Amino acid sequence: MHERADSGRAETRPGIRVLRAVEIRSDRHGLHGVADVVELRGGRPYPVEYKRGKPKAHRADEVQLCAQALCLEEMFDCHIAEGALFYGQTRRRGIVAFDDDLRALTCAVAAELRVCRDSGALPVATYKPDRCDRCSLLDDCRPRIASRRHGIGRWLEGAIGAQGVPE
């Protein structure tokens, strides 16, 4: 599903210029990334994020989209009232309003991420099947190992010992 969005190829439809794989950033909020799609409607940006699954009970997708809007607002010096999330499983585009509550949540999450980055300390991963099993970072995060009662240190000792590697 992301092949088209990641292609970087722009297209024009009546009244809309569709940009794909758009590099975005906000110095004010300390954010940067790549937006799947930015539609230019009369020259004004409208972010669209593509997701493989279906809408989730938590707001992570909305926060990601709002972060994109914050970047685009700074880049285009404009206000963006809404964007859209397209879910591959439902094949539907849902409108997301960037209200004050979502903006505040997005800024709080961004601040928490900067604290983690600046301190060099990541929170311990907690395995939650309903979220983790669908996450693209599952293999990198390894929450099942990190959240074990004895921690990764003991697991690593056991793994090394089982392979007969001398200390």
Image (spheres, rainbow, N blue to C red):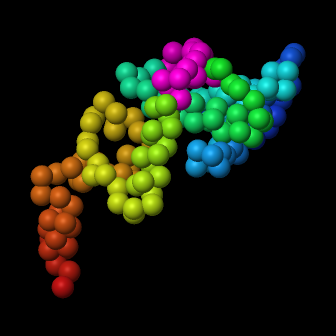
Q: How many labels, in total?
A: 0
Q: Is residue 7 visible?
A: no
Which quarter shows the N terminus?
top right
Residue 65, image x, y percentages: 57, 31
Q: Which image quarter holds the C terminus? A: bottom left
Q: Residue at x 57, y 36 (%)?
A: 67
Left or right: residue 125 compared with residue 86: left
Q: Position of residue 40 (x, y in %)?
A: 80, 26
Identify which residue is drawn at 75% across, 40% down. 75
Front residue of 4/104: it is: 104
Q: Position of residue 113 (x, y in %)?
A: 45, 49
Q: Which residues are magenta?
A: 83-103
Residue 114, how many percent across, how many down?
47, 52
- Residue 44 shown left or right of residue 81 in the figure: right
Q: Which residue: 51% across, 38% down? A: 107
Asked if residue 144 is among those painted magenta in the image, a careful observer would answer no
Q: Indicate left or right for 114 with 161 as reference.
A: right
Q: Is residue 24 left or right of residue 30?
A: right
Q: Residue at x 16, y 78 (%)?
A: 164
Q: Tell me which corner region of the image, top left, top right, bottom left or bottom right, holds residue 13.
A: top right
In reply to whether residue 93 is colored magenta, the answer given is yes
Q: Residue furthest bottom?
A: 166
Judge whether residue 85 can be spotted in this image: yes
In the image, 31 versus 84, the foreground residue is: 31
Q: Is residue 91 above or below residue 62?
A: above
